[in-house]
Amino acid sequence: MTALEDTVDAFVPGPRMALAPLGTGRLSGYAFAVKDLFDVAGALTTYGNPDWACSHPPAIATAPVVTTLLQAGARLAGKTKTVELAYGLTGENVWQGTPLNPRAPDRFPGGSSCGSAAAVAASLVDFALGSDTGGSVRIPASYCGLFGIRPTHGAISLAGARQLAPSLDTAGWFTRTASLLAGIGEVLLPGSRQGFDGPLLRVEEAWVNAQPEVAEALRPALERLEQLRGRAVGIRLAPEGIDSFFDHFRVVQAEEVWATLGPWIEANAPRLGPGVEERFAAARAIEPAVAARGRAFRRVLQSRVAPLLAGGAVLVYPTSPCPAPLLTASREEQDLVRQVSIGVTAIAGLCGLPEVTLPAATVHGAPVGLSLVAGPGQDRALLSFACDAAEMLGLPV
């Protein structure tokens, strides 16, 4: 694939950082892009914020995950935009411009890996690297009609990547086909593709949390997947209510965010865009006792989920409770979408689990994804199952 015009404003402004492959292998012939929080030697990692860019020198080394992709034969086509400091889900960046959602141009692309999702959805590259802390690969994949994965926490090195909340941060990627999603996993992920044959577990709260039209649009996909795994078993994970997942995730993340980026913010007083500025202010104000309750809830949730997945079961639920919000959505409407979305993305996030989202349906002409979640370390087996699921659903394999 040759370099194409950036028709969706996905790449970081300025000359593109392009690199030739460093070898041949599973990814030979493919072009990829990387979210601009991964270092590429000689390039500035702007982290989506002008003051971050001004206060940091160009990278002196390339992130190992990027080098691994180059060694497997892929060609780097450029660095893609991120929500500033990776702290947001809509994909908006007031400094560099918000990428267009190729599948729903009147809606946000999702974030924080907005540019990576837009570049893949517009066929500017074959795949793109993003990061996922609270849903930053899964949500834009759902919004832009792509396959996406958040791997098991710690499965892929984040050396040479900017941190947000280290106990939650992961490297993930986007593709237009299930087989390429799995092929990248063969390059980046440890372990084997040995399958598992446990049941599908339908997380009831996540289905109820979804907008009725989203749940209805995804239900036929779930029914077809039952032909692979048998009738799905309904389970409940949130007797406290799924809103509590957002409440606890928010404070766990915020405490780490402020510990990671707070010192730089206090030392540099950077310009921060709307929404992002308020989130950092809230992170700064988190009380230790509140964060401790969030961490305690995380351990409780992990103890609930681990036995369910130990025998090879797969959780299944809507990736996002709604399609991408309209570009005209108010800040209050965007915040509500963030709350109900993180209530669901927190399941895999707090438990450190691998999650794959499939572009399974559309609502009002906008894509919505269906998520599959497996036990820790089952990433490659989950990707193999995702290929089978894509074939069953008539999606690009």
Image: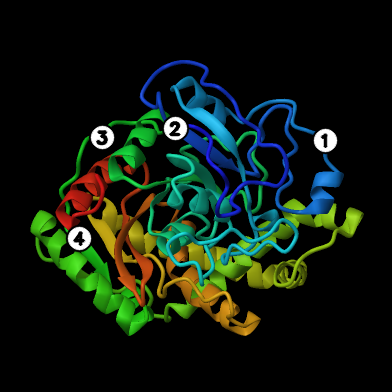
Colour style of the rendered protein structure: rainbow
Residue position for label 3: 193
Classify mark 2: residues with Cα within 10 Å, few (<14), some (14-19) or many (20+): few
Disc 4 versus disc 1: distance between alpha carbons?
A: 48 Å
Of the residues under marks 1 and 2, which one precedes in the sequence? 2
Q: Are marks 2 and 3 in contact (CB under 8 Å)?
A: no
| Direction top: furthest residue | 23
Q: Which mark is residue 151?
A: none
Q: Are marks 4 and 3 in contact (CB under 8 Å)?
A: no
**Residue 168 in sight here:** no
Residue kind at label 1, given as amino acid type: Pro
Residue under the image location 54 percent in, 68 percent down = 108
Residue under the image location 73 percent in, 33 percent down = 43
Q: Which mark is residue 200?
A: 4
Q: Which residue occupies the foreground of this view, 170 or 213? A: 213
Where residue 87 sits: x, y (%)? 65, 61
**SS class of the residue under badge 3?**
loop
State which mark lies toward you, 4 or 1.
Answer: 1
**Residue 169 in sight here:** yes
